Amino acid sequence: LEANESAYRRLVLELYARHAPNCADLQNSHGEAPGASLGFTRPAYEAVGGFAPIPCGEDRAIIRAARAAGLRVHHADDIWVEASCRLVGRAAGGMADTLRIRLAGTEYLADDCLPNVATLLDQVQRGTLGCWPAQVPQPQRVPVRELPAHIAKLRAFLNLPEGEEATASPGQAPANCWRGENFPAQVAETSEPRTAGAVELS
């Protein structure tokens, strides 16, 4: 499931790089926008009004706003950030929820930045493809098990032979970078202790 989602993501990034406004930088990039690894110049941050006061997705929202404002976005592949892999987080629908659902190995919906292929192709044809990252409403998200059909259609549209979708070329990971080995297949219900007066940063 993860391999299909990664393959579809690379194809979606290629489509955005070719057809979306102010998105050429996505070509051969990882295209990620997690809050723990974002950096801004002060003028850019102020130009978009900073982070939106929303419970989840503020990291992607500020990148969309930056692109829509014509600001340059760079996806560095030579910077590594350590972030929590907690399975209980501060925001419903955030990364902790995503990790927990995926590690459970059950059916889940593809990332909410990955529109279905019919929507993407319609937007390209109409010239209405917005800035990356997309934001797909819950009812329109693609079940991850349906991704192979979406991959085939998008690969054909992009005129890419099977297995040759654009790939990011990240730098060498640090020696202590976790790569997913030896993680339990099933994840039990978990909870994290809360310390009185502690401030949680994400």
Image: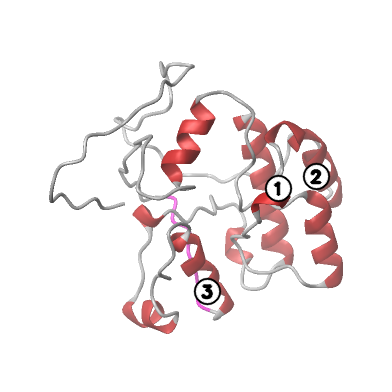
Crowd tier of the residue under label 1, counting other residues whose Cα lies within 10 Å: few below 14, some 14–19, many 20 or above:
many
Marks 1/3: CA distance?
A: 23 Å
Q: Specify the quadrant that holds the N terminus.
A: top right
Q: Secondary structure at mark 2?
A: helix
Which residue is denoted by mark 3 in the rendering? 65
Percent coordinates x, y for residue 71 in the rendering: 50, 77
Relative horizontal placement of residue 110, taking residue 64 as reference (left or right): right
Dots 2 and 3: beta carbons under 8 Å? no
Residue toward you, 46 or 15: 46
Q: Is residue 11 above or below residue 44?
A: above
* Among the 4 quarters of the image, the one containing residue 177: top left
Q: First in sequence, mark 1 or 3: give its number.
A: 1
Q: Is residue 72 magenta?
A: yes
Q: Identify residue type, mark 3.
A: Ala
Residue 48 image offset from top left, x and y in percent = 45, 79
Residue 48 appears anywhere in the view:
yes
Rendered residue at 66%/56% (across/down): 136
Q: Kindly identify which residue carries mark 1.
A: 11
Mark 1, secondary structure of its residue: helix
Residue 155's disc is: 2
Q: Residue at x 86, y 66 (%)?
A: 125
In the image as oriented, which residue stretches furthest toward the front? 196
Magenta part of the chain: 71-77
The part of the image, by quadrant, that contains residue 13 is bottom right
Q: Crowding near pointer 2: few (<14 within 10 Å), some, many (20+)?
A: many
- Residue furthest out toward the left: 197
Q: Nearer the viewer, residue 73 or 183?
A: 183
Between disc 2 and disc 3, the foreground one is 3
Taken as a whole, is the magenta stretch helix, strand or loop? Answer: loop
Residue at image coords 72%, 63%? 18
Please, what is the three-letter code of the amino acid marked with disc 1?
Leu
Residue 184's mark?
A: none
